[in-house]
Amino acid sequence: MSLFDANRQAHLSRKGPLAARMRPQTLDEYVGQQEVLGENSVLRRAIERDRLSSIILWGPPGVGKTTLARLIATQTRAHFISVSAVSSGVADLRAAVKEASDRLGMNGQRTLLFIDEIHRFNKAQQDAILPYVEDGTVILVGATTENPSFEVNAPLLSRSRVVVLKALTDDDIRKIVQRALVDTERGLGAEGLAIDDDALDALVNLANGDARFALNTLEMASVGTDDDVKTISRQMVMDAAQRRAATYDRDGEGHFDTISALHKSIRDSDADASLYWLARMLESGDDPLYLARRLMRVASEDIGLADPQALTLAVAAQQAVHFLGMPEGSLALAELTVFLALAPKSNAVYRAYGAARSDVENTRNDPVPLHLRNAVTGLMRGIGYGKDYEYAHDLSAGISAQMHLPENLAGREYYEPTQRGYEARLAERRAKIRELVEELRKEQQ
């Protein structure tokens, strides 16, 4: 480390952001994640015995992924190299690997290669480090907020252990904040600050399990105190925070998890939960037209003909959102969501179309029966197009007994209505049609 680097590190340790200053120095100081870092956990034993293999730390922001990586490097006596997937390319990775290889050859010291936001690396960048992870030149510690199953190449994933870090609990955040208030060396202890109980409750609530957010907000709120008033109030916390810590990425897995929760809450007819998940998405800035499209899908897939008005209202809600914009359009989506949740449910049309599609894909696609074809020319009429076609409106029953499927699918049934909502009436209507067709066919024999 150069003199400039040393001076910079010394300055940051005293004057840098509170969240950086309060990083745990030992595993015992590390708060939370007891399931993976508890006294008898496999990961902790591997770290303490210096037998760690490559891992990928997966968890939401502010749970200690970077901190844990630095602690691992300290505990394992490995040299620590940090690379950011946001600003580094293949050349940076190759340079880091070359340095690691030289260090291993010269003095036998292993290198811990920490890649922050590894999900942002493309396939070529991930492939560039694969051989060196495989042969042990580097111990890879990747950090990601996204599901590694989707964002990390399978070969690299198979050579690493995924460690799932959960959002910190409210008690964890409370402990971290209180520690920062009393720590006189790295925290705010030298300033003699206190925090009101309701202010601490608000800070913990707003943090959403994000320690970095909690400490940064605490530091900002502390600026509002003066020599006469050394207590941080709830209002100071609210002014410093401005908003709740973000736990939602519109392009990440959280987006798809939340839309799944919305869809399944509607399917289970839970209007309250459905409204909550809708609000979570809208208030996080999700595209309201995306939600309108997904709710249209719900109307077709999970309600269908049990209430034919569902799709009509879904289209109307989409038009309202498109015309009004936000935030006014949110009420149209809320109205639709409640309607869909409380509507009778049926996936009969969904299943029927799936069965028909399966036959299209898996059976011979025979020609359309001749009697169903339009005879628009003399040649067509001459070879039998439209011959013996029965026009339903000319028949007393309004129904014919003619076949409509290709011969190889004769008798196939796809749509089976339920007894829920309007579909119960359709079931009765269908049964009557079938009875009538059978009677007509008997008469024709």
Image: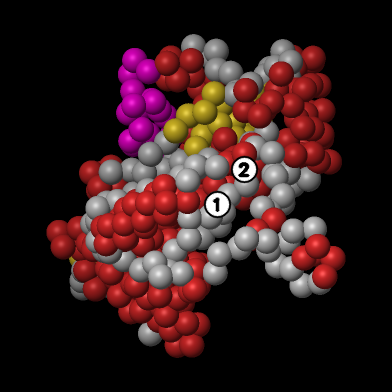
Residue 407, label in figure: 2
> Mark 2: which secondary structure?
helix
The residue nearer to you, when weighing 390 against 307, is 390
Q: Is the C-beta separation of discs 2 and 1 under 8 Å?
A: yes
Task: Name which residue lies at 62% across and 28% down.
Answer: 157
- Horizontal relation, residue 1 to residue 292: left or right: right
Q: Amino acid at mark 2?
A: Glu
Residue 277 appears at what percent x and percent y? 33, 60
Vertical comparison of 311 with 93: above or below: below
The residue nearer to you, when weighing 214 against 108, is 214
Count of marks overlaid on the render:
2
Tell me the quarter of the picture where residue 284 sits: bottom left
Residue 403, label in figure: 1
- Would residue 82 be visible to someone looking at this image? no
Residue 357 appears at what percent x and percent y? 58, 47
Q: Which residues are magenta?
A: 20-41
